[in-house]
Image (cartoon, coloured by chain):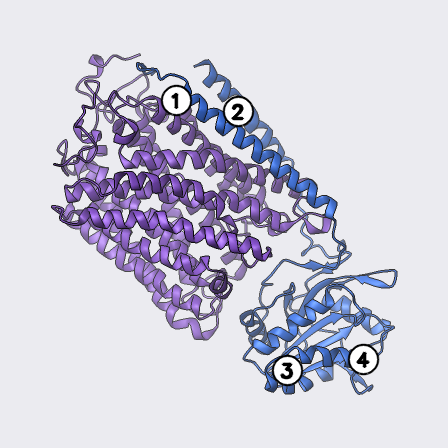
Amino acid sequence: MKTIQLYTKISIIILLVMVSITASAQAVINPAASDEDVEIGIVEHLDEYLPDSISLVNEQGQQVWLADVIDKPTIINFVYYRCPGICSPLMEAVAGVMDKSDLVPGEDYQVLTISFDPRETIDLGIRKKENYLNLMNNQDKVEAAKTGWLFFVSDSANIIRLTTATGFKYKKTGNDFLHAASLTVTSPDGKITRYLNGMYFLPFEWKMAIVEASKGQSGPTLNKVLRFCYTYDPVGQSYVLNITKVSGTIIMFFALVLLLYLVVKPKRRKLSRMD
Amino acid sequence: MHTTSAVNGANYLTYQGKYRGLLGWILSTDHKRIGLLYLYSIATMFSIGVLLGLAMKFELLAPGKTVMDAQTYNATFTVHGVIMIFMVVIPGLPAVFGNLMLPIMIGAKDVAFPKLNLLSWYLYVFGVVLVLIALFFGQGVPDTGWTFYAPYSFKSGTNLLPAIFGAFVLGFSSILTGLNFLVTIHRLRCPGMKWTKLPLFVWTLYGTAWIQLLATPVVGITLVLVALERTFGVGVFDPALGGDPILYQHLFWIYSHPAVYIMILPAMGAISEIIPTFSQKHIFGYKAIIASTMAIAFVGYLVWGHHMFTAGMSGTAQYYFSLLTFIVAIPSAIKVFNWISTLYKGSINIQTPFYWAISFIFVFMIGGLSGLVLGSLATDIYVHDTAFVVAHFHYIVFGGTGFAFFAAMHYWFPKIFGRMYDKAWANIGWLVFTIGFLALYSPMFYLGMMGMPRRYYDYLEEFHGGNILSTFGSWIMVTGFVIILANLIRSARKGSPAEVNPWKGKTLEWTVSSPPPVLNFDKDPVLGEKDGPYNYE
């Protein structure tokens, strides 16, 4: 009986500690909602319109207005063409889903890939476009993508206005940029209707986003897992694994002790019930 | 201290102890009264969970917004999941029928630690209250899904901490119940009750207790880590701080997959009691069922990776997890074959519990076989995160555990309340419920195969037909549930008095009066050489 009272006391102490932690822990950070604090990532601007008079340089080297280019549901994709990190897998994912989706680029929707590095020229963009079109298997889609997947560069003033309007936050470090992998979906009249995050897109969510954009309805962000172009920290990983190993060993040890105790210690035949 | 003679004549329902009225219940350490406390609390939570499920199906009646927006839908499926998993199916059979029947079935007066048993119930209630706090206070209802996946769980602006802490406390309740049952089964068996004479329900509770004891601490630690991550940003799971969100999934499923066996093993145990009783025949392959129970309990620890085939894992790891998943299906299949073989040449007595048991085998087989589709690597990639998965686990968790719960309820009801329910209404309730269940979940297999993802409040027009059928199914099923509930509540008070052994069962609970006396047995039971739980010859 004494042991049980001891257990009860210990449990009550643990509970009290946990309650106090809960009570003091109500200040929760939500990066998706508070915008100014976010340095790198996405601040969603759903239902807002893209600004007028943003000029871009297209694959023919001509200066065009973004508002003129957007005449159908449009997916805007920010990368920089020299990017050594997540831009390539992101573009591969875009090529992959365009290939698989039953919607036709250039007809049902278009994808605009825009470099956010003002020093880049469109030559590199054209070469990248050829590379990614080669990844697609469906020849009809490749043909359609030639006019339905457009590549652009621009100058710093226009890039900043456009990335600010879409909430795409990035940071220059040395020669490269830290940024997130995300696509912005807009309706034919330039209203932001959805964000697609991550580096893997299902044909379903692709179609859903485009169908919604064509109606001008905005939808919730499907995948909240943002991928970041960060360097990986192997030290943190090994530390974490040790914790799991240690706690696992402790649990197994106590389980073994309990089993041995129950099996080895002789059974008490008579046990009167306390009430 | 009460002697047996002092309480002769009174049963556990009418017995007057130190406290009167409600206090006599919520301060009672009688395992049967605690079992009923669990039954009432779990039935209440189940009803709330059903209403939330009904609301979700109503939203999916038509594409686009029907009754709720995306955020509300996310919150609804989160709360539905948290309630149904942590508060209904995990405690479900062990806490209700384990408490009510385990000590009687092994010839004991009570569980080994009656006060700890009562504490477990209080922890359960405390956990429930904490989760309710998350619903009504703070910055919105949790919206992460019942799995609390990182990074949602530390990035969501909703009131997650109380919910996480509630799940943590519910885990403690589960651990203490497991510990209590383990010691009870090891220590309090009556003379002659050898391990090879334990009823199979007790054996499954034994396997379950080990899982509760070993796996639950893992989720406890994990939930504490999430709370720390959310509060102090320690960077265990946040990739921006060098953490690993996939690690969360590993830790979570190391508990939550075995938790599926916490749900299903006692369900299998109850079915293993009902089938021989209503076949009036010794259970086929008693030792094979015990071996498969322990095999499930053990191998069940090693298959968690099959929840994460698409989450990023090495090919080698995927092969092993897939192989082990196929292996864990074998003991389940052994049990199904044993139940069917028990029916063969039995003197089958068709009653309500038997209907439930047979339909359990039917839906459990569909659930189990669709699980193999998800356990194979290639097909899982195709149907991962679609309605197919939702259909699969509802067939297992609801069709399996839920049907077994109703089977056990109708089987032990006369013993628990000393009154018999209206059999005709019970059968009607079963029929309506089963038809509704099949109509509700079967279309979701098809919808999932066609590509409809889970956890969306909206869908493309091409999925409309299947969703209409599914929503109609939910209405039929709830009608069945209301019939069952009304019949049982009415019968518990006004049903005709039950016999000692209405189904002619052979386990010890059928030797005591209905409802059982306060101390279970007027005379200490002793099992002779030839006595056994299923000796019908």
Q: Amino acid at mark 3?
A: Lys
Q: Are marks 1 and 2 in contact (CB under 8 Å)?
A: no
- The blue chain is A
Q: Chain of mark 1?
A: B
Q: Is residue A188 left or right of residue A116?
A: left
Residue A12 got which mark? Answer: 2
Specify the quadrant that holds the C terminus of chain A.
top left
Q: Is residue A122 left or right of residue A70?
A: right
Residue A72 got which mark? Answer: 3
Q: Chain of mark 3?
A: A
Q: Amino acid at mark 4?
A: Ser
**Residues at marks 2 and 3, CA–CA distance in whole angstroms:** 62 Å
Q: Amino acid at mark 2?
A: Ile
**Residues at marks 1 and 4, CA–CA distance in whole angstroms:** 76 Å
What residue is pinned by disc 1? B113
Above or below residue A58? Residue B468 is above
